């Protein structure tokens, strides 16, 4: 039987209690409806409940709705409370606070994206911090952010590396000096990730997996040898194509 939690009442105090109960219901659909209701009828009295639920909500869609509900409240009361969550011991709380900041889009919050968050030991928190930092960074601080982000090259699995490459590429040409320095890193994983990011910056259509494969080849063979191999492959491909065309014409 589907769980039902009523959240409609004329009593303000009872409404807050019922909303809190609904946001903590076992059924994710009930929690989603409650978060939607909270955003549709913004109530400052629900700020603490919404923030607390963000830190423990297991369902992605409900978490996203909770963040939306928070954006519906006044930034004057929401932002200071979210800032507190950035220092939480719970990774989920830090990550969702960063996500909510990205939804609010308050530029002054850039100062809250600390080095600790950019280097967070939790990959999901760090990925979110990279994305939010790139979205909020002032133009005159992009170079410093790029210098900070390149220190994370080579970190994590494919998804983590893709997130970092995208964040760096979104900063634009300002990242080139930092990437040039990182390309000399003796760690082949860092060097390959660096070159893949360079390829993505120059040609976003190449795709991350293709960029990584090409970067690994360059790192293994060296730039000059890799270029020679690539040129030979192109020549061979053209010769084969020409031979096929002549055969077909006969």
Image (tube, grey):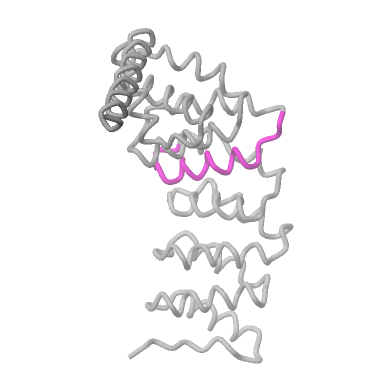
Task: Say which residue appears at 30% left-offset and 31% top-offset.
Answer: 249
Rendering coords of residue 98 (x, y %) = 55, 49
Question: Magenta stretch mostly in which secondary structure?
Answer: helix
Quarter that holds the N terminus:
bottom left
Report which quarter residue 242 is drawn in.
top left
Task: Say which residue appears at 38% left-offset and 8% top-offset.
Answer: 224
Membership of 128 in magenta stretch? yes
Quarter that holds the C terminus:
top left
Q: State the residue in front, 173 or 19.
A: 173
Residue stretch in magenta: 120-139
Q: State the residue in front, 200 or 183.
A: 200
Total numbered circles? 0
Membership of 207 in magenta stretch? no
Rendering coords of residue 24 (x, y %) = 44, 74
Rendering coords of residue 58 (x, y %) = 39, 64
Q: State the residue in front, 20 or 243.
A: 243
> In screen coordinates, is 62 left or right of 70?
left
Report which quarter residue 186 is drawn in.
top left
Q: Is residue 165 above or below residue 127?
A: above
> In screen coordinates, is 18 left or right of 81?
left
Q: In this view, does 145 lie above or below 37?
A: above
Rendering coords of residue 203 (x, y %) = 51, 30
Q: Work out which residue is located at the far front of the displayed protein and give it.
A: 250
Task: Say which residue appears at 48% left-offset and 50% top-offset.
Answer: 95
């Amino acid at each position: 039987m589907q769980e039902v939690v009523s959240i409609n009442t004329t009593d303000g105090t009872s409404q807050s209690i019922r909303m809190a109960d609904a946001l903590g219901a076992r059924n994710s659909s009930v929690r989603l409806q409650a978060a939607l209701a909270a955003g549709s009828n913004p109530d400052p009295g629900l700020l603490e409940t919404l923030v607390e639920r963000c830190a423990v909500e297991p369902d992605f869609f409900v978490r996203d709705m909770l963040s939306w509900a928070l954006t519906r409240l006044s930034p004057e009361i929401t932002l200071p409370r979210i800032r507190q969550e950035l220092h939480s011991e719970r990774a989920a709380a830090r990550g969702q606070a960063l996500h909510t900041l990205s939804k609010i889009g308050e530029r002054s919050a850039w100062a809250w994206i600390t080095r600790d968050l950019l280097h967070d030991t939790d990959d999901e928190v760090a990925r979110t911090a990279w994305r939010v930092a790139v979205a909020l960074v002032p133009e005159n601080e992009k170079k410093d952010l790029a210098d900070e982000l390149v220190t994370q090259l080579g970190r994590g699995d494919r998804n983590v590396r893709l997130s970092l490459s995208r964040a760096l590429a979104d900063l634009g040409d300002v990242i080139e000096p930092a990437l040039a320095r990182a390309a000399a890193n003796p760690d082949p994983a860092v060097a390959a990730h660096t070159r893949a990011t360079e390829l993505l910056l120059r040609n976003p259509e190449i795709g991350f997996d293709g960029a990584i494969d090409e970067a690994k080849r360059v790192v293994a063979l060296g730039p000059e040898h890799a270029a020679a191999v690539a040129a030979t492959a192109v020549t061979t491909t053209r010769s084969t194509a020409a031979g096929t065309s002549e055969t077909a014409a006969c």
